Amino acid sequence: MKIDIATMAGMLVGIAVVALAILSGSDFRIFFNLQGLLIVFGGTLAATLVKFPLHGVFVALPLGVKAAFTNEKEDPRRHIDEAVRLAKMARAGGLHTVERNKITNPFFKKGVQMVADGRELEYIRKMMTRDMARSIADNETSSRVFMSVGEAAPAFGMFGTLVGLVQMLATMDDPTKIGPAMAVALLTTLYGVLLANLVALPIADKLEAKSRYERDLRSLIVECVFQIHARTNPTEMMEILETFLPEKQRRIGAPRSYTDGKLKSARR
């Protein structure tokens, strides 16, 4: 499992900047306020639980953290090359021969196994489409949960500010109580802004981008499995599958042939 360097670097730099800004002019302890933390974190959690089902929240949060801090991107080109190789095997020896292959992607492996088992194309389409939709839905739910946290945290920070101001105004006759109430008023806003803009909203955006990537990758894999099942001609198969890639990554553009598992330009 690879760590997402960009996410880790962003988090560490953000925390370092905030910590240095605090420590350069004051004691770190004065920025810790239990009442403010309870208002922001407790209120944000409560609002999220109201907005989403309980099971959805406790599944989405760890899933979202894992997806945001790990980088499991795969090379689509590798799947295309693997699919063309398997299609050649199926054309030469039958669909059952594709079973004798080590495929690392579980989704691709499941599709190829159904092809080797002799499943009908419509059955394969239904099962793989359903599997893809469920995975994408989980990622999208995680993104919405973190987006909700990012929206609720500043709101509860403002709520804490109002609570602190009310407490301060109610104790104007006792100067010793004005400071703690003012600390609640200001620190809750700080906590809400940091939670939203340093953690929740960036993770939500990253999850959304990864969800789009996974949708594209799985759509490519589904088409790879269909083409293997159809035992499509390798050249035609490459032309079909490369439409799933950005134009600058495509190899098709001149007459080409596919030999020994590698795409080579056809010589005239």
Image (tube, rainbow, N blue to C red):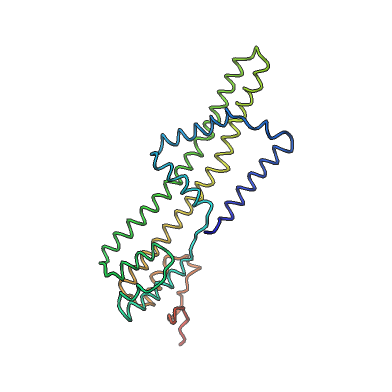
Q: Is residue 16 left or right of residue 100?
A: right
Residue 99, given in percent of the width and then of the height, sits at 35, 72
- 4, 154: nearer the viewer: 4
**Residue located at (46% from left, 78% from top):** 263
Q: Residue furthest bottom?
A: 268
**Residue located at (45% from left, 36% from top):** 48
Q: Is residue 153 left or right of residue 223?
A: right
Residue 173, given in percent of the width and then of the height, sits at 65, 12
Residue 63, given in percent of the width and then of the height, sits at 46, 49
Residue 103, given in percent of the width and then of the height, sits at 42, 68
Q: Quadrant of residue 93?
A: bottom left
Q: Is residue 87 left or right of residue 187?
A: left
Q: Is residue 220 above or below residue 17?
A: below
**Residue located at (44% from left, 55% from top):** 212
Q: Is residue 56 above or below residue 179?
A: below
Q: Is residue 89 left or right of residue 142?
A: left
Q: Residue furthest top?
A: 173
Q: Quadrant of the C terminus?
A: bottom left
Q: Is residue 219 above or below residue 173?
A: below
